[in-house]
Amino acid sequence: MVDSSDIDAALTAKLLADTTLMAMATDGVFIDEASPGATKFVIISLADEVDVATFGGRAYEDALYLVKFVALSTAGANVKAAAARIDVLLENGTITVAGYTRMTVHREARLRQTEVDALDPTIRWFHRGGHYRAQFSIT
Amino acid sequence: MAILTGRLGTIKYDPAGITPVALISVNAWKLSLKTGKQDVTCFGDTNKVYVPGLADISGSIGGFWNSSNVVLFAATRATVPGLLELSPNSSEPTFKFSGLAYLDADLDCSVESAPKVSGTFMAAGPWTEAP
């Protein structure tokens, strides 16, 4: 029996394993929410997911992930380079997940936002990345 | 008996026409059982009257391209019909429709989704409904 969470974990591991990205995202890679105090990090969120069926079981899992680099404006991060590095790693990237065969991983849309901090309006957070389609068939 | 899910449907096929084997990566089938009607309306009838003629059996199947099983595409080139067996739910395997058939296939590949396979079939011999 396959474990869908292994796809999330493999995606996270792919980014964590890249020293170039980690040199920029020094606080790490997180699912949904970063650790308190983090100022330069990557966030991965599952935005949408559909299981596509064949008779008797799942044919493949079709997921849309939001993957973005997030940095505090005063942290001195190279947001542009970090987002580009995420794209290099994920666009048609090799991601191995036990029990699955990778069908595709590719970006469907890019994202770029500046967020005003909810508590201190003088602070800005930069978000840059994209929505990545990840399809894995059941082996 | 109760209404069961279609998720456990099956499509089996044997090009040799003996022991059908389940096709993989398929997710749809449709069977059409139609009997042609002949018009036997006579003088004095108050409406048209028909009598049944021969059954016309055909249908369609669908699924995804899987390079591990391309039997459907080989079947399109067959010069003798294979044995096709359709079951609405594998938990009731005795309930099935089967018979010799010729098949056609289409492969639909686009960047938006997994390549989809669809096909049609038509009877090439007597069909049975079991049980």
Image (cartoon, rainbow, N blue to C red):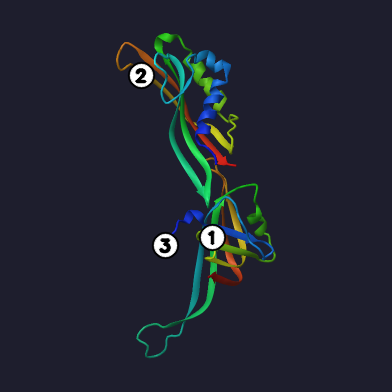
The residue at the far bottom in this view is B44
Of B92 and A11, nearer the camera is B92
Q: Is residue A96 above or below residue A121?
A: below
Q: Which quadrant: the N terminus of chain A?
A: top right
**Callouts 3 and 2 close, C-beta under 8 Å:** no
Q: Which SS class for mark 3?
A: loop
Q: Quadrant of residue A113?
A: top left
Residue that carries the numbered disc 2 in the rendered image: A115
Q: Quadrant of residue A128?
A: top left
How far, Cα to Cα, is label 3 from label 1? 25 Å
Q: Chain of mark 2?
A: A
Tell me, yes or no, whether dots 3 and 1 are on the same chain.
yes
Disc 1 packing (10 Å; few <14; some 14–19; many ≥20): some
- Disc sitting over residue A103 in the figure: none
Residue that carries the numbered disc 3 in the rendered image: B2
**Callouts 3 and 1 close, C-beta under 8 Å:** no
Of B119 and A32, nearer the camera is A32
Who's the residue at 57% across and 50% down the image? B25
Who's the residue at 54% across and 54% down the image? B62
Q: Which circle's residue, 3 or 1, is located before the other in the chain?
A: 3
Amino acid residing under circle 1? Ser
Horizontally, is B71 left or right of B51 in the view?
A: right
How far, Cα to Cα, is label 3 from label 2? 55 Å
Who's the residue at 42% across and 62% down the image? B2
Amino acid residing under circle 3? Ala
Q: Chain of mark 3?
A: B
Q: Position of residue B83 (x, y in %)?
A: 63, 65
Q: Is residue A78 above or below residue A58?
A: above
Q: Which SS class for mark 1?
A: strand
- Disc sitting over residue B60 in the figure: 1
Q: Position of residue A67 (x, y in %)?
A: 47, 26
Disc 2 packing (10 Å; few <14; some 14–19; many ≥20): some
